[in-house]
Image (cartoon, rainbow, N blue to C red):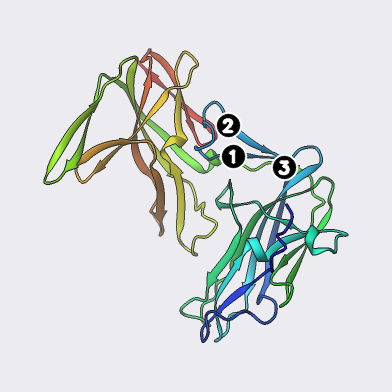
């Protein structure tokens, strides 16, 4: 992707004058660089495909590779500089080895908010000076996905406004292509129970009272699945030190019945102020910190299927995580 001819900009928010542009390169220096070359990247968005049976995959093609950069930067905080904010659209780009024309620089097309799930979005890097500075320090973090020519062995990451000054980070790209780990491998998934239901009683708040409702299938049966989802570690690329964050959406849990066909997801059961709703568009963000704590959560999912007895395969995010028997 070519850079826009629009003027590149880099803004550092200053304590005394937050809107002033930085005179000189950003006050950052790399302290840890991880470079991963990839041929393909799974798209784990539940908006685009189904985790169980029809996943979408980004493909670099024969003439290109994907490049995933994961870099930590030391920030030279000062009395004047208390916030760093860099827009990837304007100030973060890659210069392939042997290229000197800024218009041939490569712009990132994706990044990772929760490892290892790549999203198509504008890349940015921002952080604030810690309150207890200088007794406490805080680094900046950048992760970005680029598409580069196949066989490229070197490049330079450029950060900052070319007119004000840039930080240059040389990159060794000579490593072989690899794969991102499975997203499901970072979670413990417990299958706690399964049963068939003729109907699901739901309810909603209606002014000072409640509005009753029910879900009854015209064909097939409702199948209830009870699970516990427990992240093994922090998955957020932007979590503060000592804090853990992980996320998933309700459609990330799916099932395949004994006939080998996927079940239709009706949604997860959510009790909201005493009312039971069944929804499919739920996003869970688990936060935990401290010894002995976890991000585990118990959830009930409802599916529409034949209700046949046998083994039901359960999928989460990008992998099969277990089977459970329906009598």
Q: Is residue 171 visible?
A: no
Category of crowding for the residue at label 1, using alpha-carbon neighbours closer than 10 angstroms: few (below 14), some (14–19), many (at least 20): some
- How many residues crowd around disc 3 within 10 Å: few (fewer than 14), some, or many (20 or more)? few
152 horizontally vs 161: left or right: right
Q: Are marks 3 and 1 in contact (CB under 8 Å)?
A: no
| SS for dot 1 | strand
Q: Which residue is mark 3?
A: 178
Q: Is residue 127 above or below residue 65?
A: below
Would residue 309 be found to the left or right of residue 216 on screen? right
Quadrant housing residue 59:
top right
Sooner in the amino-acid sequence: mark 2 or mark 3: 2
**Circle 3 SS class:** strand
Which dot marks residue 55?
Answer: 2
What count of labels does the image hold?
3
Looking at the picture, tell me which residue is in the foreground, 305 or 194: 305
Look at mark 1 in the image and give the residue it sits on.
43
Residue extending furthest left? 208
Q: Residue at x 55, y 57 (%)?
A: 237
Q: CA distance from mark 2 to mark 3?
A: 19 Å
The one nearer the camera, 190 or 53, is 53
* Mark 2 crowd level (few <14, some 14–19, many ≥20, 10 Å Cα): some
| Residue 280 placement (x, y as % from top left) | 38, 36
Q: Residue at x 53, y 84 (%)?
A: 17
Left or right of 186 on screen, residue 59 = right
How far separated are the C-alphas under marks 3 and 1? 16 Å
Q: Do the CB atoms of the residues marked 2 and 3 lie less than 8 Å apart? A: no
2 vs 3, front mark: 2
Q: Secondary structure at mark 2?
A: loop
Q: Which callout, 1 or 2, points at the residue further toward the start of the chain?
A: 1
Mark 1 near mark 2, Cβ–Cβ under 8 Å? yes
Position in image of residue 223 (x %, y %): 34, 22
């Amino acid at each position: 992707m070519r850079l826009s001819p629009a003027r590149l900009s880099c803004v550092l928010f200053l304590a005394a004058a937050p809107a002033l542009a930085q005179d000189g390169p950003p006050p950052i220096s790399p302290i840890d660089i991880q470079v991963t070359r990839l041929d393909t990247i799974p798209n784990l968005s539940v908006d685009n495909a189904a985790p169980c049976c029809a996943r979408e995959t980004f493909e670099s093609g024969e003439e290109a590779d994907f490049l995933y950069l994961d870099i930590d930067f030391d920030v030279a905080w000062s009395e004047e500089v208390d916030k760093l904010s860099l827009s990837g659209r304007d100030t973060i780009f890659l210069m392939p080895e042997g290229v000197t024309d800024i218009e041939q620089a490569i712009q990132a097309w994706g990044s990772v908010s929760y490892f290892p799930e790549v999203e198509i979005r504008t890349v940015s890097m921002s952080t604030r000076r810690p309150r207890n500075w200088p007794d406490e320090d805080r680094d900046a973090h950048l992760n970005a996905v680029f598409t580069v020519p196949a066989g490229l062995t070197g490049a330079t990451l450029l950060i900052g406004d070319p007119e004000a000054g840039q930080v240059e980070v040389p990159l060794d790209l000579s490593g072989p292509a690899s794969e991102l780990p499975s997203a499901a491998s970072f979670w413990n998934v417990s299958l706690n129970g399964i049963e068939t239901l003729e109907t699901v009683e739901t309810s909603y708040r209606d002014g000072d009272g409640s509005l009753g409702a029910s879900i009854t299938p015209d064909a097939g049966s409702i199948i209830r699945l009870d699970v516990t989802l427990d992240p093994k570690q922090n998955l957020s690329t932007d979590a503060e030190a000592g804090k853990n964050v992980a996320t998933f959406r309700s459609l990330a849990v799916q099932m395949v019945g004994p006939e080998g066909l996927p079940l239709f997801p009706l949604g997860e059961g959510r009790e909201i102020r005493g009312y039971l709703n069944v929804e499919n568009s739920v996003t869970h963000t688990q936060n935990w910190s401290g010894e002995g704590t976890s991000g585990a959560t118990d959830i009930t999912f409802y599916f529409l299927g034949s209700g046949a007895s046998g083994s039901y395969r359960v999928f989460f995010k990008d992998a099969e995580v277990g089977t459970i028997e329906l009598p």
